[in-house]
Image (spheres, rainbow, N blue to C red):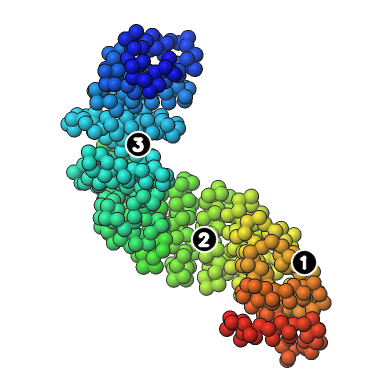
Amino acid sequence: MKNAVIGNNKQKANLIVLGAVPRLLYLLQQETSSTELKTECAVVLGSLAMGTENNVKSLLDCHIIPALLQGLLSPDLKFIEACLRCLRTIFTSPVTPEELLYTDATVIPHLMALLSRSRYTQEYICQIFSHCCKNLDSETLAFAFVRMQALKCFSVLAFENPQVSMTLVNVLVDGELLPQIFVKMLQRDKPIEMQLTSAKCLTYMCRAGAIRTDDNCIVLKTLPCLVRMCSKERLLEERVEGAETLAYLIEPDVELQRIASITDHLIAMLADYFKYPSSVSAITDIKRLDHDLKHAHELRQAAFKLYASLGANDEDIRKKIIETENMMDRIVTGLSESSVKVRLAAVRCLHSLSRSVQQLRTSFQDHAVWKPLMKVLQNAPDEILVVASSMLCNLLLEFSPSKEPILESGAVELLCGLTQSENPALRVNGIWALMNMAFQAEQKIKADILRSLSTEQLFRLLSDSDLNVLMKTLGLLRNLLSTRPHIDKIMSTHGKQIMQAVTLILEGEHNIEVKEQTLCILANIADGTTAKDLIMTNDDILQKIKYYMGHSHVKLQLAAMFCISNLIWNEEEGSQERQDKLRDMGIVDILHKLSQSPDSNLCDK
C-alpha cells in the first residue's frame, strides 16, 4: 500500500474510498499489533494525508487525530516520529480546525516533553506549533498558552545552536520576521513570563551568532527588559532567571557589559539580591515567604553570575562592583556556602574581579580573600577547582600582596597536587600558578617548588600531551632558572636531567613557541657562572644551538644567538677558551652571514 500511494493522488483516493483508513487506524491502535506494524500504518496514513484537502477531510472524519495523539504515548521513537509526521501534515492543512490540538489539555505539555527526543520530533512539533499559533482567535486562553509553549520551544531550540538560530532569524510569520515578533512580546504590557521567554529567545539567538550584539533589538529592547526583571518588584524566580539570562547575554561583549552596568542602577539593584526576603517585605502570603526563604540561595547565585559577567573586562565596572555595600564580604561568605552552585558562582565572580591589578593590590588584600579561597581549594568538585585555581594564578602574580601569605599556607603542595590531575585544565592552572610563584622569587621558594613537584613530575609535565601544560612548564623552568646564583644552584643538583629534557624538546616535533621557550631556558643556563660548563661540554647541545642560528624562523635564530652571547662575555672567566671552541665550530661564519640579514633585529644582534 505504501509504495502504491506515494506521489499518486488517484491511488490515495481509491484506497480511501475502499475503506482503508478505518482498518489502518484499527491496526494502529490494537494492543496486539507489533510496533513495526503500527509504524507502517502511521506512514501510510501520513502519505494519504499528503494528498488533496478531501483526503484530509476523510481522515478527520475517521477521528485520526485522537488515534495519532494516543500513539505519541508509545515508548518507541520511530513510531512517535511517524505519528508526528502525519499530525504535522494534517495540522498544516487549511481544512483542519486548530482547536483539535487543544481539546485535551495534556497534549501540549506532552508535545513539549517530546521536543528534545530527536531532530525530527523538534522539526514536526515546531511546525505544528507555528501553524496552530497563527490563525487562532487571540482572545482564547488556548492561544496565549500555545504562544507561550511555542516561545519556550523556540528558546530551547535556539540555545547554543547556531543552525537553528540562523533559521529562526529568517522565519516569517504573517509577513513579519520572528525576531520582530519576539521584540513585540518584550513590551511591558505583556505577561512577565512572555517578556522573559522572548528575551531568552533573542539572547540565545544573539549568543549563537544569528543576531549582532549591537543590533537595536538587543541593545534597546532585550537588555533593558532583562534588567527590568532584576528589580525588587519581580518574583524570586523572575529575578533569578532575568539575572542569569542577562549574565549569559553580556558575557562575551564588553560594550553590552558597559551598557548594562549603567542601566537602571543595575549594580546597586543586584545588591538587594542578598537581602532577600527583607523584614518589611511586601510578601503577605506565608506560603510564598516560606518558598522564597528556601530558594534565597538561587538569588545569590544569580547575582554573583551577573556580577562576574559585568566585571569580565572593564576596570571601572569592577571598581563599581567592589564599592557596592559589603560586596567583598558577601563574596567571601559565598565561598563557604553549603550550595555548590553558590560557591561556584562566588568563585567565578571573584575570578572576574581578580583580573584587575588595582583590586588585587587593594580590596583583595584588605579582605584577605586568599584565606577562604585556599579553603575552597581543599576538596571541591572539579568545576569549582578549575575557576578557583585559575584565580589563584592571579593572586600569585609578583605585584599581588597576597603572594606571601598564600605561600605560607601550603599552596606549593596544593598546586603540585593539581599538576597530577586527570583534568588538563587543572594541570595547566597548577603549573601556571607555580610559574607565577617562581617569578622573581627568592631561592628558598624555588627550592620548595622543585622539592614538592619532584623532578620526575617536572619531566612528566614536559612530555604532557596538552600544549598549554608544556608551555607553562617551560615557563616555570625559565622562572626557576633566573638570576645567577639560582641558576648555578639548581643546575648543580638537577643539571643532567634538565639538559636531557632540553635536548628532547629541541629534537621533538614541537611548534616554534615551544622551541623558542626552550632556547631561552638554554640562554638562562648559559648565563650561569658554573652552569655554562654544562653547555660547553655538551657537543650535542652546541650543535643544536648552531642549527637554530641558521633556522628559517627569526624568533628561533634570535633565541639561539642569546645563548651564544651569554657564553662569550669577555669579562667572564674562561671566555677565551669558550670563544675558541665556538670559532672552531664555525659560529663566526654564521654570524657574518646573519649580519647581512634583512631583519634589523637579527642584524644588530
Element marked by disc 3: helix
Q: Is residue 45 left or right of residue 520?
A: left
Q: Is residue 135 visible?
A: yes
Q: Position of residue 140 (x, y in %)?
A: 19, 29
Measuring 53% from the left and 68% from the top, which residue is drawn there? 402
The residue under label 3 is 153
State which quadrant residue 153 falls in.
Answer: top left
Question: Residue 174 location in percent, x, y?
Answer: 22, 38
How packed mark 1 is, by other alpha carbons closer than 10 Å (few <14, some 14-19, many 20 or more), is few
Work out whether mark 1 precedes mark 2 in sequence or the reverse, and give the earlier one: 2
The CA distance from mark 3 to mark 1 is 59 Å
- The amino acid pointed to by label 1 is Gln
User: In the rendered view, would you say 216 is above or below 236?
Assistant: below
Q: Nearer the viewer, residue 271 or 187?
A: 187
The amino acid marked with disc number 3 is Cys
Of badges 2 and 3, nearer the viewer stands 3
Sequence-first tag of 3 and 1: 3
The image shows a total of numbered marks equal to: 3
Residue type at mark 2?
Answer: Met
- Which structural element holds mark 1? helix
Q: Is residue 169 above or below residue 317?
A: above
Q: CA distance from mark 1 to mark 2?
A: 33 Å
- Could one spot residue 321 in this view of the protein? no
Which residue is the site of mark 1? 500
| Residue under pointer 2 | 391
Q: Quadrant of the C terminus?
A: bottom right
Q: Is residue 474 left or right of residue 31?
A: right
Q: Are marks 2 and 3 in contact (CB under 8 Å)?
A: no
Say above or below: 211 vs 5: below
